[in-house]
Amino acid sequence: KTTLKYHLLNPNNSELPVGSSPLPVLYVALNILWAALLAWWITINFISKSPMKNLMFVVIVSKAIVCVLSNIYWSIYADKGLRLDHLDYPKSLLYAISESSFVCVLLLISKGWKITRERLETAEMKAIFFVLILLVLTLLLFSMYSEDYYFLTLMIVYFFMLPKIFTRLTTNTRILQTQANWLREGDARYDISILETKIKLFRSLKTAVIIYLGCI
């Protein structure tokens, strides 16, 4: 009786399936990208006490850690053939936190918080808090079953929320444009550069959201 054992490897001696072989290099590039973005963000916002910027810092840090954990997972899998499945739990938690923080930033900016309004009403804050808690729990629940369900849930959330967010952004932009036009036609002594900066912020946010959704 003859027994044969085959240990199949890719041409570069990687233990990964052919379709997953580019992932270690991809996550190294993503780690460099997120590290550069984090360094840039800390540099320009080092002494900032803005809650909005703090939330964005949470988004960047959690995304960076997810990329580091993914890089560790795929590198060890490629070199030794070991699947460190226990890393999926912190990755799922951090990804849920980052996505929820990003949604929180979108909701707050779309409502004009600290831009056109100093404070939000209590009912609005409660609604945002409820949406974020529901989003975190839903993402964590579906991440335990399959990544397909996880991303499907995320896209469904964005599908229902983005129209409202874009509507609010458009409304705030029109209000600011009306105020700027009124000031232009009135007393020329008023400086409208602040209003123009806020208008650019709302417009650029729309573009940033579209690009972000395309990336995920």
Image: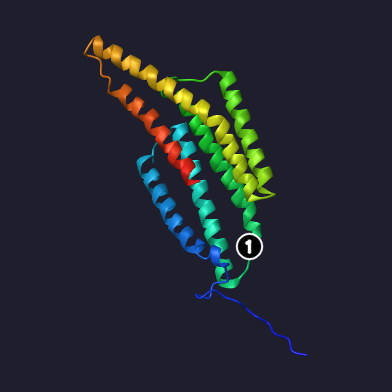
Apparent side of residue 181 relative to residue 154 in the rendered image (left or right): left
Is the residue 154 above or below the residue 190 in the image?
below
The outermost residue toward the left is 188
* x and y percentages locating residue 112 in the rendered image: 45, 23
The outermost residue toward the top is 186
* Residue 137, quarter of the rendered image: top right
Q: Out of 66 and 182, give the one closest to the viewer.
A: 182
Apparent side of residue 11 relative to residue 39 in the rendered image (left or right): right
Q: Is residue 105 visible?
A: yes
Apparent side of residue 155 relative to residue 51 in the rendered image (left or right): right
Q: Which amino acid, by three-letter code, is at mark 1?
A: Leu
Tell me the SS state at disc 1. loop
The outermost residue toward the right is 1
* Residue 135, quarter of the rendered image: top right
Q: What residue did someone put label 1 on?
A: 84
Q: Out of 50 and 159, give the one closest to the viewer.
A: 159
Q: How many marks?
A: 1
Is the residue 157 above or below the residue 125 in the image?
below
Query: In the rendered view of the protein, which quadrant contains the N terminus?
Result: bottom right
The residue located at (61%, 51%) in the rendering is 90
